C-alpha cells in the first residue's frame, strides 16, 4: 500500500518547489519561515512582472487533484456497510444497534453549520485539521476495537463512527466551497469531477477491502486511517482559497488599499476557462474506473477468483486511482503551462461581444483593464470590503449566469430560499441518505437472511458506479448552461431540481413492490438521485 501514499509526499514537494520557482531565468524565493503558505499577492505580482497570466493553472490543478482525493475521504461514510456483517457476528449487534450507530454517524456528518462559521473566518485550513484528527482517531479506535484492545460496545462504536463521519462531512465542505471559488468560470464540470470520487471512492474502498484484505478487517481499517491522515495533511497546505476571497483571517493587518487590490483579482478568475484537455484527462480516468468496477464487482461477488487474481484486481484499482496525477503532467498540449494566451480559449471569439453586451446572463469584462484600486465584487466581496472601500455602480462586473448566494453564513440564514432548499433536502434524504446507510438492514428485512461480504461490496461498488454517472450528467448540464450565448440564455441549472424527487418516488415504489433479491435495481436509482440535488446547490 506504500505506492498509494508516495505520490502525496511528492505532491507536497511540488507545492514547496512551486513557492520558490524560476521565472524567465530569475529565481524568486518566498519567506523560508513559511514556505508552504507563500504570499499569494506577491506571487501574482511576480507573474505579472514576468508577463504570465495572473491565474496559475498548474496550481489550480494541484488543488483539484488534491480535492479529488479528499472526495475519497468523504466516502468514509459508506465504509461501515462494508464490514457490518463481521461486526454483527463479532459483537452480537442487533438491527437496532446498527441503526443507532449509523444514525449517530449521520448526525455528526451533516451537522456542519458551526464549521461553516469557522470557514467564513479562517478558510479551509482549520476544518481540514479537524478532519485529520477526527478521521485518524476514529479509524484507529475502530480498528483497535475489532482487534480487542478497546471494548466493542454500541456506545464506543457510535463515538468512533461519529468521528469518522465528522471527517467525511467536514472535508466535503472544505474542498467543495474552495473549488467553487478557485474555478468559478467552469464550476459545473470541475465540481462534478471532484464529487465523482465521493461515489467512486466507495467502489475503490470496496475493491481494496475485498481484493487486498479479505477477512482482515482491522488491517483495512488501519489503511483507511493512514489514507485519511495523509490526504488531510497534504490538503491542509494545498487546498487554499484564491487571493480575491477576503475573510476575517486575511483581513488582519491589511490596509484598505491592500484589500482592494486583492478583490480586484476576482475578474481574472471569473474569466479564466479551465484547460479542456487537462480536465479531460480526469474524465478519461473516471470512465476507465467506471468500466473496471462495472465488470469487476459482479465477477468478484458471484464467482470464485483465486488469491492471485484478487490481489491483481486490488493493485489495478490503486493504479487507476493514481492515474489522476496524470492531470499534473507538464505537457503543453494539455494546456495551462503558463502560455501567454487569452483568458478564454474555449470561446475566444466571444471576447469582443462580452465587452459590449450586457443582459440577464452577466456582463463580460477584460481583466487587464479592471481598475485595481476601485474593485467591483459580488455581494460576498462587497460585504467583505473594509470601511471606505466602495464599488462603482457602473463598473465592470461579471455576474455568474446563475444566481449565487453571497455573504456570510449568518447572511444566508436570513434568506427564505435557504430554508426552502433545506426542507427539500430533508424530504429527499428520506429516500436517499436513510436508505443508503441502512442498506444492510433493509436487505436482511426483505430477504430474510444475512448479506455476505461480497454482496455488501457489490452494493457499495454499484453505489460508486451509479453516483459518478449522475454527477457527470449534472456537471455536463451545468457546463451546457454556462456556455449558452450571452444574448440567448434560455436555460438555468435549477430546471433540473424536480429530477431528484421524481427518481426518489420511483425508487420508493420499486423498493416496496419488488422482491428482496431484486432490490439492487431500485438502489441504483437511489444512488443516482442522491447526487442530483446536492450538485445543484453546491
Image (tube, rainbow, N blue to C red):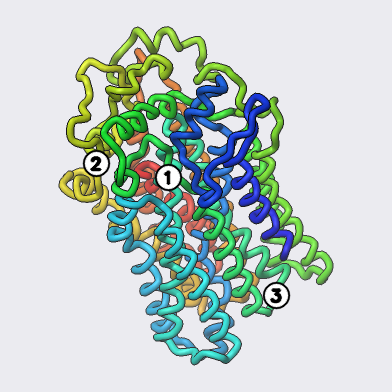
Q: Is residue 173 left or right of residue 27?
A: left
What residue is shown with label 1?
A: 178
Callout 1: SS: helix
Q: Which residue is mark 2?
A: 407
Observer able to see residue 419: no
Residue annotated with mark 3: 214
User: For residue 411, which quarter of the picture?
Assistant: top left
Give x and y (percent) for residue 338.
Answer: 60, 26
Q: Residue at x 77, y 66 (%)?
A: 310
Q: Is residue 370 above or below residue 249?
A: above
Q: Is residue 396 above or below residue 170?
A: above
- Disc 2 residue crowd, few under 14, some 14–19, many 20+, Cα 10 Å: some
Point out residue 65 in the picture as x, y percentages from the top left corner. Answer: 58, 46
**Frontmost residue, 38 versus 293:** 38
Which-is-in-front pick, marks 3 and 2? 2
| Position of the N terminus by quadrant | bottom right
Amino acid at each position: 500500500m506504500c505506492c498509494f501514499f508516495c505520490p502525496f509526499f511528492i505532491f507536497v514537494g511540488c507545492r514547496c518547489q512551486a513557492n520558490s520557482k524560476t521565472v524567465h531565468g530569475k529565481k524568486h524565493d518566498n519567506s523560508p519561515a513559511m514556505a508552504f503558505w507563500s504570499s499569494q499577492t506577491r506571487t501574482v505580482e511576480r507573474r505579472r512582472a514576468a508577463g504570465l497570466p495572473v491565474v496559475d493553472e498548474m496550481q489550480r490543478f494541484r488543488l483539484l487533484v488534491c480535492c479529488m482525493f479528499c472526495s475519497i475521504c468523504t466516502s468514509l461514510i459508506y465504509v461501515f456497510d462494508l464490514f457490518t456483517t463481521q461486526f454483527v457476528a463479532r459483537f452480537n449487534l442487533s438491527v437496532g444497534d446498527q441503526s443507532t450507530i449509523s444514525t449517530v454517524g449521520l448526525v455528526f456528518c451533516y451537522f456542519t453549520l458551526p464549521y461553516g462559521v469557522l470557514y467564513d473566518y479562517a478558510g479551509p485550513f482549520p476544518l481540514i485539521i479537524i478532519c485529520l484528527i477526527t478521521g485518524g482517531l476514529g479509524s484507529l479506535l475502530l480498528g483497535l476495537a475489532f482487534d480487542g484492545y478497546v471494548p466493542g460496545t454500541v456506545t464506543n462504536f457510535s463515538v468512533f463512527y461519529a468521528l469518522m463521519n465528522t471527517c467525511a462531512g467536514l472535508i466535503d465542505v472544505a474542498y467543495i466551497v474552495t473549488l467553487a471559488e478557485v474555478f468559478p468560470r467552469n464550476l459545473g464540470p470541475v465540481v462534478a469531477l471532484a464529487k465523482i470520487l465521493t461515489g467512486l471512492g466507495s467502489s475503490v474502498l470496496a475493491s481494496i477491502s475485498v481484493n487486498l484484505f479479505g477477512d482482515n478487517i482491522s488491517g483495512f481499517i488501519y489503511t483507511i486511517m493512514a489514507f485519511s491522515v495523509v490526504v488531510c495533511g497534504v490538503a491542509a497546505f494545498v487546498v487554499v482559497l484564491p487571493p480575491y476571497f477576503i475573510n476575517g483571517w486575511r483581513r488582519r493587518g491589511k490596509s484598505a488599499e491592500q484589500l482592494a487590490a486583492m478583490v480586484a483579482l476576482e475578474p481574472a478568475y471569473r474569466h479564466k476557462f479551465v484547460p479542456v484537455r487537462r480536465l479531460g484527462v480526469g474524465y478519461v480516468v473516471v470512465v476507465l474506473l467506471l468500466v473496471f468496477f462495472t465488470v469487476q464487482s459482479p465477477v468478484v461477488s458471484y464467482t470464485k477468483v483465486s488469491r492471485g487474481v484478487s490481489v491483481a484486481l486490488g493493485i489495478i484499482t490503486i493504479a487507476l486511482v493514481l492515474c489522476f496525477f496524470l492531470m499534473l503532467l507538464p505537457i503543453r498540449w494539455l494546456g495551462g503551462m503558463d502560455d501567454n494566451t487569452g483568458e478564454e480559449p474555449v470561446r475566444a471569439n466571444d471576447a469582443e461581444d462580452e465587452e459590449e453586451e450586457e443582459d440577464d446572463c452577466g456582463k463580460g469584462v477584460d481583466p487587464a483593464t479592471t481598475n485595481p484600486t476601485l474593485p467591483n465584487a459580488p455581494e460576498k466581496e462587497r460585504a467583505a470590503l473594509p470601511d471606505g472601500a466602495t464599488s462603482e455602480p457602473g463598473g465592470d462586473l461579471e455576474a455568474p449566469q446563475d444566481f449565487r448566494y453571497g455573504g456570510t453564513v449568518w447572511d444566508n440564514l436570513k434568506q427564505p430560499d435557504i430554508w426552502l432548499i433545506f426542507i427539500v433536502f430533508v424530504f429527499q434524504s428520506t429516500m436517499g441518505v436513510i436508505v443508503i446507510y441502512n442498506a444492510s438492514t433493509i436487505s436482511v428485512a426483505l430477504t430474510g437472511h444475512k448479506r455476505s461480504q461480497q454482496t455488501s461490496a457489490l452494493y457499495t461498488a454499484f453505489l460508486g458506479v451509479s453516483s459518478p454517472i449522475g454527477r457527470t450528467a449534472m456537471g455536463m448540464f451545468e457546463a451546457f448552461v454556462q456556455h449558452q450565448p450571452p444574448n440567448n440564455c434560455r436555460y438555468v441549472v435549477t430546471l433540473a431540481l424536480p429530477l431528484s424527487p421524481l427518481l426518489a418516488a420511483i425508487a420508493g415504489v420499486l423498493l416496496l413492490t419488488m422482491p428482496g433479491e431484486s432490490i439492487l435495481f431500485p438502489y441504483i436509482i437511489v444512488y443516482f438521485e442522491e447526487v442530483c440535488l446536492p450538485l445543484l446547490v453546491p
